[in-house]
Amino acid sequence: MFMTLRCLLALVCTGAVGIASAGTPAGPQILTTDASRFYTLYDRTGGKPSIAQLRGYMAEGTPGLAELAKVRRVTPERIAESIASQPGIYAQGRSCLAELPVVKQRLVQVFANLQAIYPQATFPPVTLVVGRGKPVGLTSKSGVIIGLEALCAADFMNPNVQDRFVHVIAHEYVHIQQTGVIDFEPGDPRATVLSVSLGEGIAEFIAELISGNVGNGRHAAWTRGREVHIESAFALDLDSTDLSPWLYNYKPGSQEPYDLGYWVGYRIAKAYYLQAKDKRSAVRALIQQDNPKTILAASGWTPGMWMPAKVTGVAARTAAR
């Protein structure tokens, strides 16, 4: 069933986000020292650093690199194995290192926009590291940690390198702000398709508000014309704890759609925002949500309902007032 949301023309404008003034604080530190140190070592060794040299790289690392090592079992041995088995992603990562100054400059406005629409925002650092080829990004006590080589290779998400880094970092930084449960232990019955998809979808939607686009720009093309079909199937799986049809199901090299739960969760979050009279309160409710069924019910979302392709510009600035 299609639903037209009232007063959209008064609320929505596509285009670049321009929420905050030039005087707004710049947000967190964006630390690139680990990535720079890695590629200094990489260049010095002809792209073949030894395990002992990688051990030195990790020993001198930032708290973000130490956190990645602990949480995702990143060791010198595993980095060396990854370099040997996937040399291309490390060679490609070298080119992405050169994009970081512009990425950092663009993120100043993104974080200012976040503070404008969500004054409660906290700003731990963003750390760009080089690891074992995955993950692309994670959040922790140390802030947001981005695997430079992993994100650089993820051109399936967005072909433009700078855009990819900016929008993915914006997505991950929203996770830092979320106060409800978004990380679940294996087997947790609360980890339903709806709860996990909404947690990721809210991060996508707020990323769009503050950076101008979602982390994974491929979903728009994959889902165009198939909204009713995809969302009707999602509605049948809301309470399922089998996440595999909807989340974390990318297969390397595949051109098939993946992570469609992110996209449906994003659509639910967008519907909630659009129906809300108080946009700033809506942003706060989305970021702080701990009851996905309540957000779903209040959103008015139905499978295939019409919504604007993006919510930026006028609607985003409304939340900053």
Image: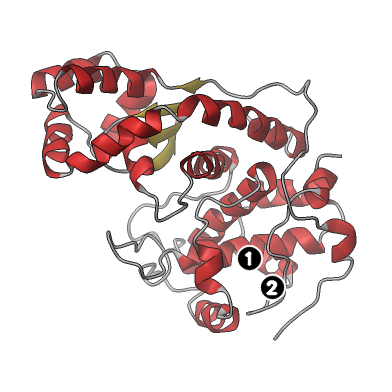
Amino acid type, callout 1? Arg
Q: Is residue 99 above or below residue 228?
A: above
Say whether residue 142 is visible: no
Q: Crowding at label 1, few (<14), some or many (≥20) Cα neighbours within 10 Å?
A: many
Q: Is residue 87 above or below residue 240?
A: above
Say whether residue 60 is visible: yes
Q: Are marks 1 and 2 in contact (CB under 8 Å)?
A: yes
In-front residue for pair 35/135: 35
**Percent position of residue 148, x then y:** 36, 34
Q: Which colour style is shown? A: secondary structure
Callout 1: helix, strand or loop?
helix
Would residue 294 appear left or right of 21 to someone viewing this image? Answer: left
Amino acid type, callout 2? Trp
**Percent position of residue 257, x then y:** 41, 69
Res 19 → quadrant: top right
In-front residue for pair 15/203: 15
Callout 2: helix, strand or loop?
loop
The tally of labels here is: 2
Residue found 53% across the figure and 31% down from its top? 103
**Percent position of residue 250, x then y:** 34, 61
Residue found 54% across the figure and 84% down from its top? 229
Find disc 2 in the rendering and name its residue.
301
User: Which quadrant of the figure contains the N terminus?
Assistant: bottom right
Residue found 37% across the figure and 59% down from its top? 248
User: Which quadrant of the figure contains the C terminus?
Assistant: top right
Sequence-earlier tag: 1 or 2: 1
Q: Residue furthest bottom?
A: 1
Mark 1 → mark 2, Cα distance in angstroms: 8 Å
Would residue 148 appear left or right of 283 to someone viewing this image? Answer: left
Find disc 1 in the rendering and name its residue.
267
Res 267 → quadrant: bottom right
